[in-house]
Amino acid sequence: MAKTLKRTAAFTALAKSLVAGARGGPSLSTRIAAIPRMMKATTRGQYDGGMRLAMMAAATAYVLSPIDVIPEAFLLVVGLADDAVMVAWLAGSVLAETERFLEWERGQDRIVVP
């Protein structure tokens, strides 16, 4: 049940982010350009995205890894389905987190340090 809720949340975040981009939200290039800044701010301790970035890195490693939890060679469709779910979750997470980071970054611009 919990996995279903997490998948639903990931797909919902993906849909919302894609719609937001189409309605004047940040473009994909803006989001991609924000990723290095987000990583830098996280490593400096300025942004609280550490665990989310770690999960996204783990998901990327999972998808790119030649060793898979469910080998595609033996379970063709099911083996590819777990990768497809992971890619969908990863895309939704990256879009949602970059949206969150860009909002945080805009808030930082308003803070004036004397």
Image (cartoon, helix red, strand yellow):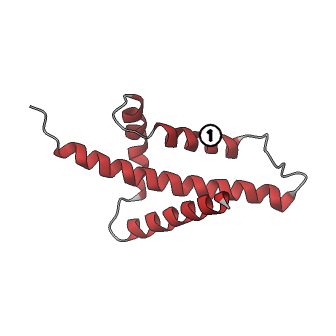
Quadrant for the N terminus in the image? bottom right
Find numbered disc 1 in the image and state the secondary structure of the residue it sits on. Answer: helix
> Could you say where residue 29 lies in the image, as x and y percent from the top left?
41, 53
Give the residue at the far left of this rendering: 114
- 52 with respect to 80 (left or right): left
Amino acid type at mark 1: Ala
Give the residue at the far top of this rendering: 44
> Could you say where residue 46 lies in the image, as x and y percent from the top left?
33, 34
Instruction: Please tell me which residue is depicted at 51% across the width and 39% down the height of the picture.
Output: 51
Residue 57 falls in image quadrant: top right
> Could you say where residue 30 lies in the image, as x and y percent from the top left?
37, 52
Residue 113 falls in image quadrant: top left
Instruction: Please tell me which residue is depicted at 45% across the width and 55% down the height of the picture.
Output: 96
Considering depth in this image, is 5 or 11 the residue closer to the camera? 5
In the rendered image, the vertical position of residue 50 relative to residue 86, given as above or below:
above
Instruction: Please tell me which residue is depicted at 34% across the width and 63% down the height of the picture.
Output: 25
> Could you say where residue 84 lies in the image, as x and y percent from the top left?
69, 58
Can you identify the residue that label 1 sits on?
58
